[in-house]
Structure formats: C-alpha cells, structure tokens
Image (cartoon, helix red, strand yellow):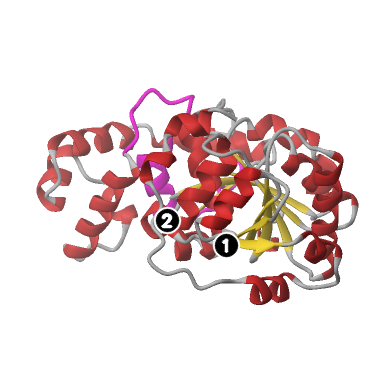
Amino acid sequence: MGQIRLNLDSIAMMLFCARLKAYKEAPLSNDEWLVVEKAIKKHGLKGPASLLSMSQSELEELLEINEFVAYKMSKRIKTLNIFLSILNNFEEKGINVTTKYEDNFPNLLTKHLRKRAPLYLFYCGDISIIKNGISLMGLVKVTKKDRIHTKRLIDKVVDEDYVYISNDSKGIDTVALKYALQHGCNCVSFVCERLAAKQKEYSRYIKNGQLVMLCAEDPNSYFDVTNAIDRNSYVCALSKYQIIISSSINNGATWFTTLQNLHNKWTIPMAIEGVYLGNDRLLDMGVTPVYVNDVLSDYTFDMIYEKNKKVIENNEINIDQMSIFEFIGE
C-alpha cells in the first residue's frame, strides 16, 4: 500500500466524516463534527486522532455527545483499514486529498466561508497554484457577444496574473475555462461530480501544472443539487471578483448563487450592464456594474470595480427569490 500523505488528525476526521460511495457506515455531518471538535477542545484532548482508540461509551462520556453520534463514530473506527485502502486507491489514480488540518488546504475557503467551508477536498494537480482568482458565471446558452466578452475578460485574468476559478458548468464557464487553458492561464476547476472521470479530459493541463481540479465529494459521485449549491459557494470564496456575463430573472444557478453571495458576502459580484434583464435586476440589488466599454478597455479588474462601485444602503434581498427550484431550473 502506498503512503497516505495526511496527518493523523486529518485521517481521523475523514474516517468519521467522509461521504464515500464505497462505504456503508454513515458519516457524521459537518455540524455533528463541529460539535465533536468543540468537545475535543473543551476536554483538552490532543486532537481528532486521540479519538481513534476509544469505544462508543468512552466517546459518549468523555465528549458528552449524543448516543447516535458516538455510535456512528465507533462503527467507523472499526473500518480504518478499509478507509485507508479507499484513499490509497484514489491516490493510485492521481486523486489526492487534503483537509482543513493540512498546510496545503486553501485558506480562502475557511476565511470566507467559516463553518460552511468543506472539511476535506479531493484534488488532482498542483494544489499550490490556488490563490485569489476571478470567476465568471452565466447562462448555458452563449451568444456571439457573450463569447467576445468572456474571452476579453479572460485576457484580463491572464494579463493580471490571476487564476481563473471554474465552476465546471456548461455555457459561459466552459468557454472561459477552455480559452484560459489555451492561453496559458493557471486554472482551478471546482467540480461537484465525477472528478475521477473528468480528470482524464484535462489530464494534459493537470500534468503540466496549469490546472488543479477540486471536489468536496466522493470522486465517483454523480450530480446532486445540494453539492452543486455548495460548490458554487466554494467558487465564490476562491474569487476576488465574480463577473456575471448573463443571467435570467428568478431562474438558474447564476441568479441563485448571486443572491446567496449578496447575502453572505463571499466575494465581490459584478455584472455586465445593459445586455440582460437578469443582470440589470441584479444591479438594482447592489451588484457592481461592468460596462461593455470596461470589458473592451485596458482597465484592470480593480480599476473597473473602484470606478463603478456604489454605496447602497439598506438594500434587502427578498429571500423568496432564493428558492431551490430556481437553482434546478438551469
């Protein structure tokens, strides 16, 4: 068996929490794990690894956690060898893992998302290329104008030495990612399904160190709406600016994510003005405009933001507009 490059606290946390298709034992939820973490600190234990030798009753009594959580943990402890074997199989396929207890975990996620940050990430490629980036969002249907705007914005990403943060969606993001990779831009692609299959499509860029692909789910998992919503928040957290190329009022992932982002302030959203009604409605809610002349100019992203930002007071977003069904619509 190969070397698992994780510290013992990471291995313990993943053993308890990782949602793996090959596993029949139920994992702890993120919220359940945060309760366990607090108990570890409260009782002066050395870290998650100290739990691996405990029985169910010891976990219950020492951590003062409920019986069901202790039961799930004790069931998982008995499967440590199976768990390490699963991680090793992933590693043999070029899929590594990191956790919030590791030095290489992207700190932008914990900084911006706090408790909503993923506990662990599977990844392919050089994770050290992750830094504050730029992401683009838009509709699946891409017009000729959209394509021009997308490519020009990616030119700015390259010129300013940002990384492009992809959300692995059809349409605008696909155009942006392919153009970015072809023009030597370092890219981070956050997927929410089938990382194991998708890494093959981009293996050339992964091997040359230009692309890292991330996933907070089992690398063999299939599409799930909740995972997709979480993935969009992770993309926001890794982005200094998120530019909305196109959007539809009350419909689709772009609209839903932007409303969430306005509410949670994960990143600075900007939208191209005067091209889509959805964009113009988002501008009314407080998104910073990007004018077509800005896109075609030599202005940097910072210059565009500073020039166009508005101070909007008492701007409230209607939570009813954040329906899950809007997300599914795209």
For the residue pair 277 and 8, the one nearer the viewer reads as 277
> How crowded is the residue under tag 2: few (<14 C-alpha within 10 Å), some, or many (20+)?
few
Looking at the rendered image, the quarter that the N terminus falls into is top right
Name the residue type under label 2.
His
Q: Which residues are magenta?
A: 1-28
Q: Is residue 61 magenta?
A: no
For the residue pair 190 and 49, the one nearer the viewer reads as 190
N-terminal of the pair, mark 2 or mark 1, is: 1
Label number found at residue 177: none
Identify the residue at horizontal 55%, vertical 34% (top origin).
251
Locate residue 143, reporting x and y percent: 82, 38
Mark 2 residue element? helix
Mark 1 residue element? loop
Q: What is the CA distance from the residue labelled 2 to the residue labelled 1?
A: 29 Å
Judged left or right of residue 132, residue 202 is right
Name the residue type under label 1.
Asn
Q: Is residue 252 above or below residue 50?
A: above
> How crowded is the residue under tag 1: few (<14 C-alpha within 10 Å), some, or many (20+)?
few
Q: Is residue 86 above or below residue 310?
A: above
Locate residue 235, reporting x and y percent: 58, 51
Residue annotated with mark 2: 263
Judged left or right of residue 127, residue 28 is left
Identify the residue at horizontal 43%, vertical 40% (top origin).
321
Q: Main secondary structure of the magenta part?
A: loop
Q: Which image quadrant is residue 55 in?
A: top left
Judged left or right of residue 207, residue 325 is left
Residue annotated with mark 1: 104
Q: Is residue 17 magenta?
A: yes
For the residue pair 39 and 212, the one nearer the viewer reads as 212
